[in-house]
Image (tube, rainbow, N blue to C red):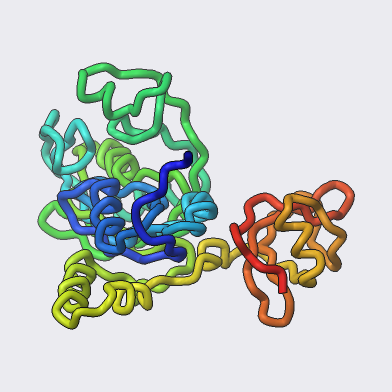
Amino acid sequence: MARRRKGRPIDGVILLDKPTGISSNDTLQKVKRIYFAQKAGHTGALDPLATGMLPICFGEATKFSQFLLDSDKRYRVIAKLGERTDTSDSDGEVVQTREVKVDRGQLERCIAKFRGTTDQIPSMYSALKYQGRKLYEYAREGIEVPRESRKITVYSVDLLRFSNNEVEMELHVSKGTYIRTIVDDLGEMLGCGAHVTYLRRTGVAKYPIERMVTIEQLEALLEQAKSQDISPGELLDPLLLPTDTAVQDLPEVQITPALATYILHGNPVQAGPVPAEGTTVRITVGEQREFIGVGVIDADGMLAPKRVMANQPAQ
């Protein structure tokens, strides 16, 4: 007999404003408990030091979390010049101290070199895996393992402030970009070393920053529900964004309810007009444009399902 899952079967995305000093996974578990959700997952870890936007997917939305992992991100960062740490942030140990002889012009020229597409070698203090173990696990044991460089794109990087050996910047970057590594590389380029003292993620995909909520706000709503003797979901669930916001950047293909039946059972359909072969699309049904999943256009021009919502009636 299948074991019954604990919690509520809720679907959607909450934009959490992650606090500093806690891991993304611990943050996820706290929010999952507050919502008493059956299933939840986050969409790209933030360092314990970092704060800011951490989309958390509930239920059916977890099927589409990869699209948020692959999306662009925006950050605000403060770097301290003159000190290099083993983790490239202030949570680590200082391994080198050097004099800072940097003027604003030199700093701006170095920053400009990060714009565009470049290769980045991830830090040993990252959650990437090597032979089944996370890199930071090796790093804590003093072991350095080979890491392959990865293509990243820095769409923009703007210098906001340079004073008292501190550099404050805003960045818009592609998936997989490590801001700590950019700061460490900048410090070496300047010849004085640098590390992150403050990092805040201000954007994921096109999610609005004003929809972020804190754990404290969620806990307050939970207490309010208890004091009013109402279901917590009545106050918490309105904060959820629809599941399809995780794929809002994908082109839409609208199909009929009859075709939706085939899609929901895993069968490709002839739907037109459709984008070019290989294009990943979000699939909606009928005049209400009800979201039922994500598909891909195959070599025959057919719409083939890739991820579909469970228990969706084709009406």
Camera sees residue 71: no
Q: In which quarter of the image is residue 139?
A: top left
Image side of residue 302 versus residue 191, left or right = right
Q: Quadrant of residue 81?
A: top left
Where does the image place residue 306, in percent across and percent down from the top left?
67, 50
Q: Quadrant of the C terminus?
A: bottom right
Q: Nearer the viewer, residue 85 or 50?
A: 50
Residue sitting at 65 percent across and 57 percent down?
294
Q: Nearer the viewer, residue 147 or 43?
A: 43
Q: Which of 267 and 198 is in front in this view?
A: 267
Camera sees residue 80: yes
Image side of residue 268 versus residue 32, left or right = right
Image side of residue 148 versus residue 292, left or right = left
Where does the image place residue 7, in percent across and percent down from the top left?
35, 57
Q: In which quarter of the image is residue 99?
A: top left
Where does the image place residue 70, in percent across and percent down from the top left?
51, 50
Residue sitting at 33 percent across and 55 percent down?
108
Residue sitting at 33 percent across and 62 percent down?
53
Image side of residue 259 versus residue 160, left or right = right
